[in-house]
Image: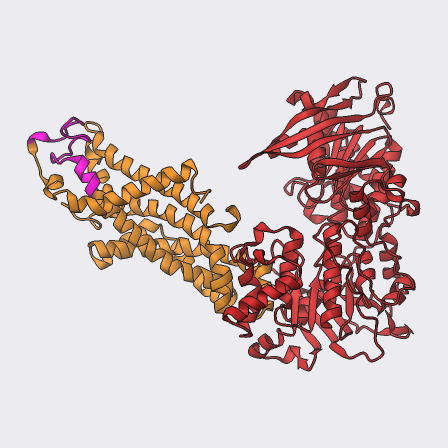
Amino acid sequence: MKRFLTPQGVIGFTLIVIIVAIGIFAPLIIPPDMATKMKMTMRLKPPSMGYPFGTDQLGRDIFFRVLLGAHTSLGIAGAAVAISVLIGLPLGIISGYARGALDNVLMRFVDTLLSFPALLLALTISAMLGPSIPNTIIAIGIAFTPFLARIIRGEALRVSAMPYVEAARAAGTNDAAMIWRHILPNVMPLVIVQATISLAFAILAEAGLSFLGLGTQPPNSSWGLMIQASRDYLDVAPWTALAPGAAVALTVLALNMFGDVLRDVLDPRAQ
Amino acid sequence: MTGATAMHPAEGHPIIKVSGLRVEFQTDDGMVAGVKDVSFEIQPGETLCVVGESGSGKSVTSLSILRLIEFGGGRIAGGSLEFARGSGEVIDLAKAEPDVMQSIRGNEIGMIFQEPMTSLNPVFTIERQLTDGLKRHRGLTGEDARGRALELLKEVRIPEPERRLTQYPHELSGGMRQRIVIAMAMACRPRLLIADEPTTALDVTIQAEILGLIDRLKRENGMAVLFITHDMAVVAQMADRVVVMYRGDVVEEGPVRDIFEQPREAYTKALLAAVPKLGEMRDKPAPEPMRILGDETLRSAAPPPTIGTRREPLLTVKNLTTRFPVKGGLMRRTVANVHAVEDVSFQLAKGETLSLVGESGCGKSTCGRSILRLVEADSGEIQLDGWNVRGLSRLDLRHARRDMQMVFQDPFASLNPYRRLLDQVAEPLVNFGLASGSELHDRVAHLFDRVELPRSFLRRFPHELSGGQRQRVAIARALAPNPKLIVADESVSALDVSVQAQVLNLLMELQADLGLSFLFISHDMAVVERVSHNVAVMYLGRIVEIGPRAAVFENPRHAYTRSLLDAVPIADPARRRPHDDRSFRPLSSPIFPVGAPVEPSSYDEVAPGHFVLRPLAAA
């Protein structure tokens, strides 16, 4: 608990709570037309009392669009990272623990996927499945899996060589118990840190897919969609990119701070 | 050869005079003093040994003199470090400017670190590393620097010095690397040489050579030497004067003879008592517990049983061979084999201890792990109390492991940092279905009593314990399934001497009470002499000599056993053994090409039960 009450931990945790609360409650509180209502006379207006973050190219209120976009962006990124951890963690641990032929087969497959840029992979999968939010989640989730599996395998390999694993083997521990009791807890700190970093990238990946018309569909808002839409007006109305960009940056920062502290808190040595 | 300045220090001033040194570290819990109040001085041509257990502040002291402590987060909070420079000027290093320190480090003060593997930069040649300091401090260039580097290599007596200059650190053995590190420290003829545990990572025969080398260089150059070690035997061999440190304070200081013969302080006495001395087991029929002073709470351990008349064998190993393939080439084919264990046979009786001794890489650990099948042997036979260990299926092997357990070397790495001690000690009981629920808890609590750990530790994590306490946890875990055999692989070598003595006594006491057999794997001859009934000496994968402890130690018949015993430093300054640091063993390697003919081991019985390996034709 003491570790958690560092400035970094408190700020990170508070930010995460606020951002997640916005993601969950904003769609319930804010009437949807606040964000979709177009007003052609109010196009590309700078921030003012009535429009704290200004308006976009269709005269929509950026403030409400950012609040509502949190739901889509965080939801998609969170679910996608959850998928990649659910697939990548067992893959990486089995590969690193078993070694030998199985490891070779699994990792050659992972390497093949790794040789494509993650976004290209997500794009291909998304194009095959068709544009929808569940498909976007699946596409990003699968695209992020190889990287995670690779990193977890390395850690599992290192942990498997530790004397306490050999000691447990000498004590008659079977493979399933070995992974559950010894490998998994020692790999988790890395998974947590990696997952928080992946979340940030997933938010950006969703933005990329949305831009290409394969992610979130208008008139729904997501941070990525807003950043991409602002691209044509950057010189005349930079605030259109500023607010969603700041939202992404703040979320990534909060996640990193929180991830670091979470790892320390989970480490019994730090208590 | 020796610079004139090195011979004439400032009038009557010691080379270094440390007064009231205090060093603090900033931690999460505020300021912590690593060194509280340390004072000493060293005259030219004198070796001062600073001795103490881990955490005593001995390394902090040496790093403070070089002001390297600031790079480790420490701060000199008080005291002075008066250093007599070659120019005759005396300066206080504690207040010196960074650029002055730069001109002193590696120039007037040389430093040798513990780990020769990591204190050399792997991407530079030996020449580059040796000439760096010469170019910086002495302004030498090109051929001159190279010539001086060559001279230095000759001085530390490295064979084929010309060739070494172009080599990289990984091409050299550990002992040779440490010679390079010494040559680097000597490059600019320092007035003060600081050696921080310079031989701790080295084998005993190489340690003897390196100690001899440092001693000779000191005599030839009139340097002052600050020698830091935890090993009382090394102190006895090297020191002129000794400073004993404990928890950041100087406990006692004096000439080496006085410290060893009439120690004044209780801590020094306890430290000396805990050191096993080679040869003190002469004429004793059975292993004896270590003496422990100053700890009245510890019951005196019951001596382990003498060798009985009816000796029932528990473990029989016949012709055990374990090899590791060396892969190479594009196709990762096996190009050679490391013959880690080669045709090893021995017998271990119930309730007795057989020690496997030898230097690093001799195959003693692999032998122990092959018996537990933590590595798979290539051939041979292992009989453990009715089990044919090598023929067991995976399932049967798990059952057989109830009878044989292992205690590992590093108590910090052999416990899972993320599990409570209760769960870790309970693990074998759970695995074998020996207990569950409250019975499980009770049995683990009893095991904690057995190894003299408080029950309040049950719910703790490993990091909350000291090294010795962790090793007790590891022993409790090994005891849990009531094994008949415990393989103790360097189980006490990572511990401080006083803790080592306690853990050894615990092991001997458990043996007496439970009738355990130990396969005790160690490089420490003095400890082995103390605990063993029988001893096997290993060299390059083979047992070169095996027999009753008294026979092997008092009448060693194999040349290797003799050289090993000769190299062990003795914790008695009256029995110094000057070592010729020129004696190089030929570098033999246990790596053989695939399909190389291997001779079987054959032995001569020189006395009842005392066998010596016949010379191999190929060797």
Q: Which quarter of the figure has residue B307?
A: bottom right
- Residue B24 image position (x, y, % from top left): 63, 31
The vertical placement of A268 against B67, above or below, is below
Q: Is residue A252 visible?
A: no
Q: For residue A55: magenta?
A: yes
**Picture coordinates of residue B450 (x, y %)?**
66, 64
Residue closest to the eye, B509 or A269: B509
The answer, for residue B512, to whether it is visible in the render is yes
Q: Which residues are magenta?
A: A41-68
Query: In the rendered image of this protein, does residue B448 appear above or below residue B256?
Result: below
Q: Horizontal placement of B74 versus A217: left or right?
A: right
Q: In terms of depth relative to the viewer, which is nearer, B482 or A134?
A: B482
On screen, residue B187 above or below B369:
above
Query: Residue at point 59% right, 59% down?
Result: B455
Q: Residue furthest front?
A: B296
Q: Is residue B596 magenta?
A: no
* B19 or B589: nearer the viewer: B19
Where does residue A173 sit, x and y in percent of width and height?
A: 54, 69
Which chain is assigned red?
A: B
Q: Quadrant of residue A107?
A: bottom left
Magenta stretch, main secondary structure class: loop
Residue A81, above or below B394: above
Q: Position of residue B290 (x, y in %)?
A: 80, 57
Q: Which chain is orange?
A: A
Report the side of B550 relative to A94 (left or right). right
Image point 63% across, 80% down: which residue?
B391
Q: Residue furthest bottom?
A: B386
- Quadrant where the N terminus of chain B is found in the figure: top right
Tag count: 0
User: Horizontally, is B313 left or right of B396 in the view?
Assistant: right
